[in-house]
Image (cartoon, rainbow, N blue to C red):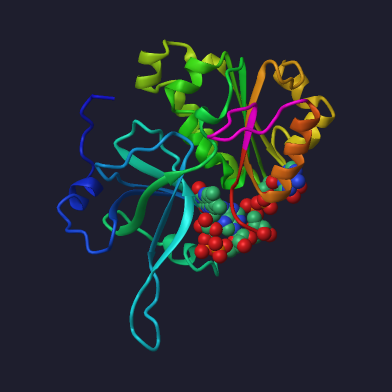
Amino acid sequence: MTEQKPVTEAQATAVPKVPTLPDAQTVTEVQHYTDRLFSFKCTRPATLRFRSGEFVMIGLMGDPDPKTGKQKPLLRAYSIASPSWDEELEFYSIKVQDGPLTSKLQHIKPGDEIILRPKPVGTLVHDALLPGKRIWFFATGTGFAPFASLLREPQTYEDYDEVIITHTCREAGELTYGRNIIDSLKDDELLNEVIGEGFWKKIKYYPTTTREESAKMGRITDLINSGEAYKDLGVEPLCPQNDRAMICGNLAFNLELKDMLEAAGLEEGANSKPAQYVVEKAFLD
Ligand SMILES: Cc1cc2nc3c(=O)[nH]c(=O)nc-3n(C[C@H](O)[C@H](O)[C@H](O)COP(=O)(O)OP(=O)(O)OC[C@H]3O[C@@H](n4cnc5c(N)ncnc54)[C@H](O)[C@@H]3O)c2cc1C
Ligand SMILES: NC(=O)c1ccc[n+]([C@@H]2O[C@H](COP(=O)([O-])OP(=O)(O)OC[C@H]3O[C@@H](n4cnc5c(N)ncnc54)[C@H](OP(=O)(O)O)[C@@H]3O)[C@@H](O)[C@H]2O)c1
């Protein structure tokens, strides 16, 4: 994306600020979706290189120690939701009301600073998968974040004929961030230019809810086991020859889906040994 974008008011006020935190980055945009979910963008360190799908440690300074008065950084793992080519970084976050980090992070505004340790890592990367025809991105809750990055990564469409993204949440409002990303893809200048107009026809989006009514209800695991998801999507069942998969959700979901993929004959891959699927926790339980 070489086109010059207009500088927003938030960016204009953010740029001249002198960083005061170690590894400080400046927040440029914040958007809230529900009382439990928000996303934000921040400046990207010029030296930061990462692969779409990786995560970094981000955070804020913790409260002063009551004895010494010293403050320590309070850091948590976060998937980078923006693609590797983007000028800014984007994150999609939970708000845990008594969570050490997110009880504070949920109040950030443009111009504020966050701490970002520039050491990206992770298994949800194309390098950890062998070539295939179709890629499945399986997400629950904030586990959508790494796929928000990979869905905007040209390699996803260069490597695969079909891209299926499933997102299971409790409530319909929790699908909004993901839906907005999917909707924005049609107009993505870089992808239209690099992959070609109509690239988005490769994408099949399958959002489901479990505790509030929506167009499709049920856990993706159950919908696959019953064959309903395959029927809805108009695809053949998972097979090791054609399918590759990335999983990012709560632990029980990850384990259940992992078992299902193994039963279908897919093997787990890693950066050091690419195979047919990869998995990462969306949060620690
Ligand atoms: C590899 C990895 C990548 C991650 N990427 C993201 C991300 O992109 N976005 C994000 O919001 N979180 C992500 N997390 C979780 C994140 O690291 C923190 O746990 C989260 O920000 C809450 O921090 P906290 O200090 O407020 O509460 P914590 O003390 O960390 O968590 C308190 C409790 O809140 C619940 N919880 C924590 N995170 C989530 C979540 N994401 N969704 C639902 N419940 C949760 C858990 O039950 C946890 O025990 C990731 C975790 C890992 C291990
Ligand atoms: N989402 C909320 O409104 C809400 C509100 C307050 C507190 N919390 C707390 O926040 C934490 C995380 O909640 P969350 O909603 O973000 O994430 P979550 O509990 O991981 O649920 C996200 C989605 O994953 C589904 N799921 C869970 N286990 C699965 C499995 N084994 N296989 C397939 N699908 C599975 C859930 O379906 P099911 O609904 O069938 O479990 C839900 O649709 C929980 O501790 C929760 O108690 C959540």
21 left or right of 38 in image = left
| Quadrant of the rendering where the N terminus is positioned | top left
Q: Identify the residue at the far front of this view.
A: 272
Which residue lies most toward the right here?
226
| Residue 210 visible in this rendered orientation of the protein | no
Task: Tell me if residue 260 can be seen.
Answer: yes
Q: Residue at x 76, y 36 (%)?
A: 221
Above or below residue 40? Residue 106 is below
Q: Residue 25's x, y, as percent?
A: 29, 53
Point out residue 250 in the picture as x, y percentages from the top left corner.
Answer: 66, 49
With 150 as the anchor, is 214 left or right in this view?
right
- In the rendered image, the quadrant that contains the C terminus is bottom right
Query: Ligand 1, what quadrant?
Result: bottom right
Q: Residue at x 48, y 15 (%)?
A: 158
Q: Residue 38's spot in the image, x, y percent?
A: 47, 51
Q: Residue furthest left?
A: 16
Q: Is residue 114 left or right of residue 153?
A: left
Question: With respect to residue 28, does 223 lie above or below?
Answer: above
Majority secondary structure of the magenta segment? Answer: loop
Figure check: 115 above or below 187: below
| Residue reaching furthest to the bottom | 67
Q: Position of residue 245 (x, y in %)?
A: 64, 29
Number of marks in the image?
0
Residue 254 placement, left or right of 6: right
Membership of 213 in magenta stretch: no
Q: Is residue 273 magenta?
A: yes
Q: Residue at x 38, y 64 (%)?
A: 60
Asked where in the image residue 266 lies, by quadrant, the reply is: top right
Q: Quadrant of residue 44?
A: top left
| Residues rendered magenta in the picture | 265-278
Q: Residue at x 29, y 56 (%)?
A: 23
